Image: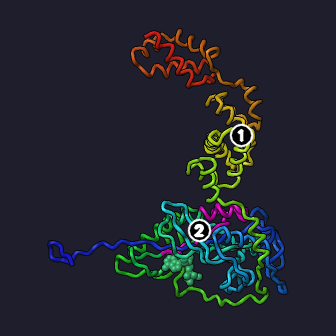
Amino acid sequence: VTRNRFGNIERKPVEYEAVIGLETHVQLKTRSKMFGTSSAEYQNADPNTVVDAVSMALPGTLPVVNEKAIEYAMMIGMAINCNIARVTKFDRKQYTYPDLMKGYQITQLDEPICYDGYIDLPLDPPVRVRINRVHMEEDVARLVHVEGPQGGTIHSLLDINRAGTPLMEVVTEPDMRTSEQVESYITNLQHIIRYLGVGTANMEEGSFRCDANVSVRPVGQTELTTKVEVKNMNRVRAVVRAIEHEIERQIAVVESGERVVQETRGWDDGKGVTIPQRSKEEAHDYRFFPEPDIPPLVITEEWIDSTQAKMPELPIARKDRFVDEWGLNEYDADLLTAVRATADYFEEVCAGVKASTADVKKAYAKEAANWLNGEMARMMNNDEISNMSQTTVKPAALATLVEKFRKRELNNNSAKQAFEVMYTKGTGPETVIKDLGLGMVSGADSLGPVVDEVIENNEKAVVDFLAGKEASLKFLMGQVMKATRGQADAAQATEMIREKLATRR
Ligand code: ADP
Ligand code: MG
């Protein structure tokens, strides 16, 4: 025991760590519903127009499992290193709510499709988040609450379109410790889902929803403590803020000598706080029992094998390959592999470049990456286009531009000008370069006379430069660029000016 100068026992401040587990619901992009025949694509449909007897829970209807939804869940499971169950079963979860058509939800309680997996988060150092399970269930209908003139809901409308949409749930073990890890987990899972093409994984549109389970404990303690479940976050940013707030709140509770109570809290994005929604005592008893209308589903080895064969290269593996094969840095590789269409586009550009050696190939790849992450990304951002394949620039056209740029047939200005026209008009590089009269002005024959003239006409700058004022060189270069309409080989022009003026010293 150490005592301070007042004779009191010195208490060391306790250091806390957070423990976080995520439950994520993901809508799967199948053509039809989880158990019914109507279209699962309801986002742009008028209310109550994409429904069927099963999704509306009409009497006498029977659910039929959507094979594609099971296959998509298996693909996600494989992507996150899960075991695939050989038999999986469905269960009824009962509760009453106006958006729950049948009075129960068909979900999976204890025999999920996938179990015991993990995602390695590409952080420094890497963090392994174990996956408890991946199971399938159905989404509920949608309530639209209509506000009266004095505020408050005066009546509610029911749109059944969403009822029965395939919903996959991915549950992690409580392995995350910081909001940064949670953010990485979410974005990596989103990338995987989009790569597989099984969902849009968009938080804002509600096709990807996260509930965060958060607890805090003194650093070094291994036992889990009471957790709080936080809901209602509809952006990654909101999840991060909600978790950070919840960690601080819980530490304050513990520090004040109180205990954290097990409850569900909702995130209020405007106020930046979590507020109590429901305590443990109010928790539902869902009266789960095996769904009698769906027999246990057998997943055969053949089905697993044929699904495995459909798996594409996944984002993290592809990023590593881009670093190895194309010599990109981590940052560029990260940007290019986040979206599959971008990664495909980049590789098509690289395939279109004629390179003699591995080094030349890498140099071209690096240049292509610069154009895609630079000019292309900027233009797409302006036009709010997210998919590179939707632009009018063909990969082969960009490959040609990159080659001309690398071979110094065009300088930076001209290449950018050409790219802009290629992007806005969809014209090929040769035509653009001819139409705009672009081309590098270089060599003693073309560039030499221009430099001579600039030196001739700018006596003051020349004298200043000779007197040691380096800035005057910039001015002279500006004049050369002006005279060549921005097309001079900048490096060569600088060199020429220096050489020609050196003789005057
Ligand atoms: P429940 O029985 O309340 O549903 P589960 O054990 O099924 O709890 O876990 C639900 C989620 O909560 C999982 O993502 C899990 O990782 C997470 N979790 C469980 N215990 C804790 C804890 N003490 N702190 C943080 N997260 C936890
Ligand atoms: Mg649970």
Q: Which residue is mark 1?
A: 353
Residue 239 at x, y percent in the picture: 54, 66
Q: Is residue 496 above or below residue 20?
A: above
Which of the colour schemes (rainbow, by chain, secondary structure, one colour) is used?
rainbow
Does the magenta run of residues contain 447? no
Quarter of the picture holding the N terminus: bottom left
Q: Secondary structure at mark 2?
A: strand
Quarter of the picture holding the C terminus: top left
Q: Taking 390 as reference, is 126 left or right?
A: left
Of 172 and 277, the residue lying toward us: 172
Q: Taking 413 as reference, is 1 left or right?
A: left
Residue 462 visible to an observer of this rendering: yes
Residue 320 at x, y percent in the picture: 60, 55
Disc on res. 94: none
Quarter-of-image position of residue 76: bottom right
In percent of the image, x 46 and y 71: which residue is there?
Answer: 246
User: Which residue is outermost to the front?
Assistant: 357
Q: Secondary structure at mark 1?
A: loop
- What amino acid type is highlighted by mark number 2? Ile
**Which callout, 1 or 2, points at the residue further toward the start of the chain?**
2
| Label 2 lies in ligand 1 vicinity (Cβ under 8 Å) | no
Count how many numbered circles sit on residues in the image. Answer: 2
Of 319 and 197, the residue lying toward us: 319
Magenta span of residues:
187-214
Q: Which residue is mark 2?
A: 119
Of 236 and 193, the residue lying toward us: 193
